[in-house]
Amino acid sequence: MANRGRRGGSAGGRLWVLALLAAVAVAIGFVAGHLTRDLGYRRTAPPLPRRSAGPTLAEQVETLVGPLDAAGTRVPVADRGAARHLLSRLERLARENPRRLQVDASPEERSRLRVRLTVGSDSYPAEIVWPEEAAPGPGGGATGARLALVIDDLGADAGLARDFLDLEVPVTPAVLPYLAHSLDVAHLARGRGREFLLHVPMEPQEGRRANPGKGALLSSMSEAEVRAGLEEALSSVPGAAGVNNHMGSRLTELSDRMTWVMDELRQKDLYFLDSVTSPRTVASTAARAAGIGWARRDVFLDNEQDVQTVGRQLDQAMQKARRNGSAIAIGHPHRGTLEALRLWIPKFRAAGVEIVPLGGLIQRPTG
Ligand SMILES: [Zn+2]
């Protein structure tokens, strides 16, 4: 009995050891799976593109129209003007890459533009679409007041950016370069068919003592440094439709600096929104002189961030839009701003003010 008991006991012990080994093996597999998934995630997380390597031609096309698909790509834009602008950027890229990229556009339709993109030996159909009612008539006849809501300073928090992008109205995100989630916010915007701005840090007046952040354009920089700094910031978050200034109350007063900036933007076919952080800004004058699309901010929404104050600023922006036909307001990723926008969406509708992407309110150079 004692022997059998011991034998039984040792058989049971072996079973326990086997079970323990099996459990350890499963645990190791589990941990290893997670580990490789984490490593894999880190590998596939988009690295900051290096200027030396440069994006492939297909990637350059994709930053303009989104993922290429042999079954067809749909590219929603604000209006007919924005569609033509996008087509001109594609055609420019084709001219820069003869024989490697071909862009064949069909005649423009009522609310879409069909384009065949041939990259190397692969061919992709795409259609650029816009809402019919947003197309301005031949007399420039705006049917109603239009208001663009730009949300600056995005890139630190992807979740908060998503909350703004998920609003029922198409806010226009402005992404700071070199932040942890700059690229994520750009991808979120792209995934929703939204254009986004690169929010370029520029030197403020000394008295403000604020640090404009990494990649800031400074008055002490040479022309080559300003141009290189801007180009690097743009290539760190590819696909922006335009640029606006973060801070910059000093730099935007300097005509030569602004001329360099606008000339760089002209070469890249980007527009400029003057955030107007100084009453003496010459940024939009320089943009107009350079022959690029431009606009000026009318209202800041959230210098104070409680819902009621932001709401009053939204009322003011709506009044300006009704008085002048359009207006541009800039807000920031604050909870109070988000909440006020949610509450004001029905008021925009009631007031007959249409919220449009910024691209729809850009003054385009003629000819
Ligand atoms: Zn800013």
Image (tube, helix red, strand yellow):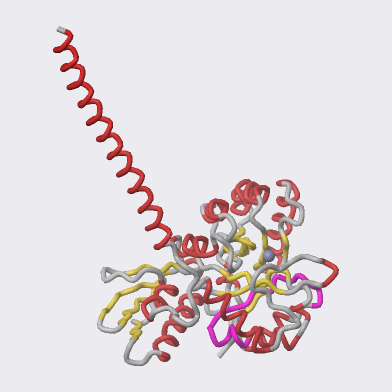
Instruction: Quadrant for residue 146, please give it.
Output: bottom right
Residue found 74% across the figure and 58% down from its top: 316
In percent of width and height, residue 45 lies at 43, 62
Residue found 22% across the figure and 31% down from its top: 18
Relative depth, front residue between 6 and 187: 6
Instruction: Quadrant for residue 233, please give it.
Output: bottom right
Q: Is residue 333 left or right of residue 53?
A: right
In percent of width and height, residue 38 lies at 40, 53
Q: Is residue 307 above or below residue 55?
A: above
Q: Is residue 245 above or below residue 341?
A: below
Residue 77 shows in this picture:
yes
Whether residue 31 is in magenta: the answer is: no
Whether residue 275 is in magenta: the answer is: yes
In percent of width and height, residue 288 lies at 66, 85
Looking at the image, the residue that sits furthest to the front is: 3
Quadrant of picture, ligand 1: bottom right
Q: Is residue 125 above or below residue 1?
A: below
Start and end of the magenta stretch? Answer: 263-280
Q: Is residue 52 above or below residue 29?
A: below
Relative depth, front residue between 256 and 181: 181
Residue found 59% across the figure and 69% down from its top: 177
